Amino acid sequence: MVSDKFNNDFKNGLGGKFRDKKFVSIVAIGIFVLILAIVLIVKGCGGSGNVDDTQKGRGDELQEQSIDEKTQGKEETEEERAQRLLREGQELLREGQNYMNGTGGRSKDYEKAFECFSDAKRLGVKDADAWIGICERKLKQAEKNTANVPKKN
């Protein structure tokens, strides 16, 4: 009895579902949407990666400025551009370290250091993540210290 039902379903194309044009259309649309979503995820949706263009940091400004300067002369290759951006990022990392430690003629300023480290990260400096973490910890410690200082009346 069960085998008869199975044989009938098999002969009828799984109960005739694949013969139903609506079902086939819905499956085709679903597959299309899935493929489109995968392509958009892999390609990054074509956006700049920034949620808001008003959040541009110093690294973005340096990158745009350097691109403008380079286009006035000769065209740079992708490899040259990548190396230049990495150098700029490393400079930002050093500047952030100077702000963090109060060296290099800079006074200690954890917020400016955080900004430099974030910009260095945008330019592809791998060590910037670690420095961002250290800077966040220092900022929290500084906030705790200022909160524990008794107020004078």
Image (tube, grey):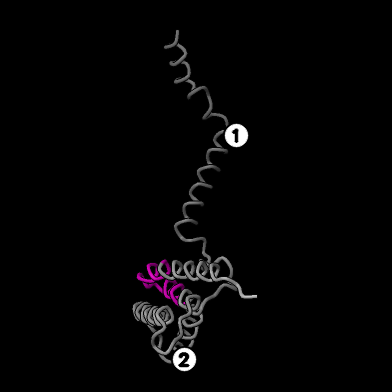
* 76 or 54: nearer the viewer: 54
Residue 10 at x, y percent in the picture: 44, 20
Q: Quadrant of the C terminus?
A: bottom right
Quarter-wise, where is residue 29 in the image? top right
Q: Residue at x 48, y 61 (%)?
A: 44
* 47 or 19: nearer the viewer: 47
Give the magenta-colored segment's residue range.
116-133
54 in the magenta segment: no
The circle drawn on residue 72 is 2
Q: Secondary structure at mark 1?
A: helix
Q: Main secondary structure of the magenta part?
A: helix
Q: Residues within 10 Å of mark 1 (few under 14, many from 20)?
A: few
Q: Quadrant of the N terminus?
A: top left
For residue 29, above or below residue 145? above
Amino acid type of the residue that numbered disc 2 sits on in the rendered structure: Gln
Give the residue furthest to the top: 1
Amino acid type of the residue that numbered disc 1 sits on in the rendered structure: Lys
Chain-order first, disc 2 or disc 1:
1
The circle drawn on residue 22 is 1
Q: Residues within 10 Å of mark 2 (few under 14, many from 20)?
A: few
Residue 144 at x, y percent in the picture: 51, 66
Q: CA distance from mark 2 to mark 1?
A: 59 Å
The circle drawn on residue 124 is none
Residue 38 at x, y percent in the picture: 47, 52
For residue 152, above or below residue 26? below
* 139 or 47: nearer the viewer: 139
Pointers 2 and 1 in contact (CB under 8 A)?
no
Image depth: mark 2 or mark 1 in front: 2
* 150 or 86: nearer the viewer: 150
Give the residue furthest to the bottom: 73
Quarter-wise, where is residue 134 in the image? bottom left
Residue 151 relative to residue 74: left or right: right
